[in-house]
């Protein structure tokens, strides 16, 4: 039975289970306690109680550290709920209930210290400037497989054509210097093209921004932004040696965004096939994984300093 009081002493095992070191866990735990208290207070306000909080049977996850360990193991390892129940000594239905309760809590906890990425909104330009004052950004699309939908219309939308899979996609913008994910676009069906995703997100960049992109964003030119992208081979023609050399140079400059995506997909809930069917959960899972990736980077930078 996994509990933090025992697992917390084994640094290597803890990192394998949650994807981060104990220092990062304890840093997140402080905010997690605050977010959990706020969520519980709101829940008590919305429901008429017949007895004071704390009455009834004691929960299996009795401490905040155990609750945080539970949800981080689920995000990192992404076991089936039956396996998660075996690890934490609870039934599958109880696991399902705890996942539903704790996911918004960890999302709120990551938002308290600005680890969560910016989402497309009217304040996107201002937020991008605050997150990356150097005004250098890399944009890319990332895809993750999902279960084949039962609905015929959703099957057509989510069929990406890659490896005969159904998938969902997001636009990601990263900071090339830190490799942090600073913006996450809306979750879209796998059929949608990367350029169309960026256009639907209607991203606004600060004036004078410098944007690196791949050939999938040909024709995507936001106002006031200097864009750099590799040149496509013309139909029936070939690229010159100089153009090939330039394409290689641009590809090397774009490597940090691939590292950012790899860091996010280090967490199993977005790294493999996504199984949950709850509406909006696929988007929340990606946002939380980006937040955890950013937390790990901040902790690494702080330790190096």
Image: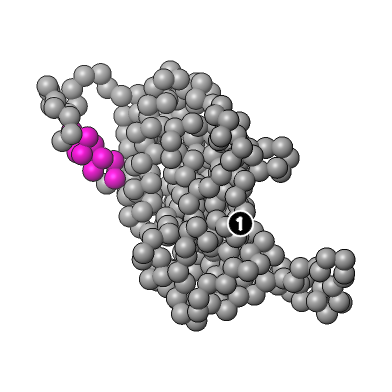
- Image coords of residue 30 (percent x, y): 32, 49
Nearest the viewer among 134 and 60 is 134
Left or right: 268, with 278 as reference point: right
Q: Residue at x 49, y 35 (%)?
A: 74
Residue 296: in sight, yes or no? no
Image: 156 above or below 204: above
Q: Residue at x 21, y 19 (%)?
A: 56
Query: Start and end of the magenta stretch?
Result: 35-44
Residue under label 1: 194
- Image coords of residue 47 (percent x, y): 17, 29
- Image coords of residue 129 (percent x, y): 42, 73
The tally of labels here is 1
Other residues around mark 1 within 10 Å, as few (<14) / some (14–19) / many (≥20): many
Image: 84 above or below 131: above
| Residue 228, image quadrant | bottom right
Q: Check residue 9 for magenta coloring.
A: no
Left or right: 61, with 305 as reference point: left
Residue 91: in sight, yes or no? yes
In this picture the colour scheme is one colour
Nearest the viewer among 204 and 79 is 204
Q: Check residue 39 for magenta coloring.
A: yes
Image: 190 above or below 63: below
Q: Residue at x 48, y 52 (%)?
A: 186
Q: Residue at x 59, y 68 (%)?
A: 220
Secondary structure state at the residue bearing disc 1:
helix
Image: 25 above or below 207: above
Q: Main secondary structure of the magenta part?
A: helix
Residue farthest along the bottom direction in this orientation: 208
- Image coords of residue 61 (percent x, y): 35, 28
């Amino acid at each position: 039975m996994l509990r933090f009081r025992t697992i917390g002493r084994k640094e290597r095992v803890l990192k394998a289970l949650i994807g981060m070191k104990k220092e990062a866990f304890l840093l997140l735990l402080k905010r997690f306690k605050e977010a959990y208290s706020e969520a519980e207070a709101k829940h008590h306000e919305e429901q008429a109680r017949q007895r004071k909080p704390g009455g009834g049977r004691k929960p299996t996850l009795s401490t905040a550290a155990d609750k945080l360990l539970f949800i981080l193991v689920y995000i990192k390892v992404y076991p089936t709920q039956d396996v998660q129940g075996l690890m934490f000594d609870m039934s599958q239905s109880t696991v399902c209930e705890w996942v539903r309760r704790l996911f918004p809590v960890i999302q709120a906890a990551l938002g308290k210290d600005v680890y969560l990425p910016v989402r497309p909104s009217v304040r996107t330009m201002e937020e991008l400037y605050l997150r990356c004052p150097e005004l250098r950004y890399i944009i890319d699309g990332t895809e993750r497989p999902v279960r084949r939908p039962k609905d015929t219309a959703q099957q057509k939308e989510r069929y990406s054509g890659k490896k005969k899979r159904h998938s969902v996609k997001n636009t990601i913008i990263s900071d090339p210097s830190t490799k942090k994910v600073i913006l996450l676009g809306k979750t879209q069906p796998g059929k949608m093209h990367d350029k169309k995703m960026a256009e639907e997100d209607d991203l606004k960049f600060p004036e004078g921004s410098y944007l690196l992109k791949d050939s999938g964003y040909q024709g995507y030119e936001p106002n006031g932004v200097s864009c750099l992208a590799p040149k496509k081979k013309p139909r029936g023609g070939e690229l010159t040696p100089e153009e090939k050399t330039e394409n290689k140079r641009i590809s090397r400059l774009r490597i940090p965004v691939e590292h950012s995506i790899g860091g996010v997909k280090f967490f199993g809930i977005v790294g493999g096939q996504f199984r949950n069917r709850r509406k909006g959960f696929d988007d929340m899972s990606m946002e939380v994984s980006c937040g955890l990736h950013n937390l790990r980077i901040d902790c690494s930078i702080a330790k190096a300093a």
